[in-house]
Image (tube, rainbow, N blue to C red):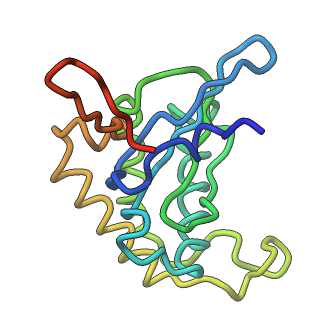
């Protein structure tokens, strides 16, 4: 089987950031998946499950209510590894163009007094939420985005390092 794009990225070198993951054509239009990485895979602890669940609810609600972007949002959901989220949007734009939207979304978590949809009627596991930890993770990521906004590594997946010999031969990391 062919390795899917998200498994072909060197996770040892990923830093938190907003990355283009893949583009697809659906119904005659482009759909783009972004990797919104909150922590370093395999170096930092995964995000607390209950906090991740709360971030999913709060930020999905924010994104789907943003007056400019709401019609572009297809999906917001957690990665299985709990190190970030996937955002799927209509169209195709570089990650820098969604920076402000995501910064505002993560900053909005601080204003949340409750987790939207955290009831037995609206949520598959309504007891698994942690608003205070969600606020902590959101503030940490928002601060990181602000501090690193000018750095290309928070918008571009790391490139594989290649050893080049004196005679020009290239060796690739396996």
The answer to whether residue 168 is above or below residue 79 is above
Q: Is residue 147 left or right of residue 113?
A: left
Vertical position of residue 148 compared to residue 49: above or below: above
Is 2 on the left or on the right of 100, as rendered?
Answer: right
Q: Which quadrant of the figure has residue 8?
A: top right
Specify the quadrant that holds the N terminus: top right
- In the figure, residue 37 lies in which quadrant? bottom left
> Picture quarter containing residue 70?
top right
Residue at the limit of the structure toward the right, as seen here: 121
Most foreground residue, 161 or 34: 161
In this rendering, is residue 69 above or below 53?
above
Q: Residue at x 58, y 47 (%)?
A: 7
Q: Position of residue 28 (x, y in %)?
A: 76, 11
Q: Is residue 163 left or right of residue 7?
A: left
Q: Residue furthest bottom?
A: 127
Q: What residue appears at the point 18 percent right and 18 percent down from the top-left corner?
A: 167
Name the residue: 60% across, 59% down. Answer: 79
Residue 95 lies, in percent from the top left, at 40, 32
Residue 60: percent from the left, percent from the top? Answer: 60, 55
């Amino acid at each position: 089987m062919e390795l899917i794009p998200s498994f072909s990225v060197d996770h040892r070198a990923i830093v938190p950031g907003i990355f283009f993951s893949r583009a697809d054509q659906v119904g005659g239009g482009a759909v783009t998946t972004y990797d919104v990485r909150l922590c370093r895979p395999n170096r930092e602890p995964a995000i607390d499950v209950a906090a991740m669940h709360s971030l999913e609810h709060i930020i999905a609600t924010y994104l789907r209510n943003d007056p400019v972007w709401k019609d572009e949002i297809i999906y917001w959901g957690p990665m299985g590894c709990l190190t970030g989220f996937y955002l799927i949007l209509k169209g195709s734009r570089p990650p820098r163009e969604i920076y402000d939207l995501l910064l505002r979304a993560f900053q909005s978590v601080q204003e949340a007094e409750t987790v939207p949809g955290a009831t037995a009627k609206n949520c598959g596991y309504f007891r698994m939420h942690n608003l205070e930890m969600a606020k902590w993770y959101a503030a940490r990521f928002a601060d990181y985005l602000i501090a690193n906004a000018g750095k290309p590594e928070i918008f571009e997946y790391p490139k594989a390092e290649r050893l080049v010999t004196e005679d020009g031969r290239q060796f690739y990391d396996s």
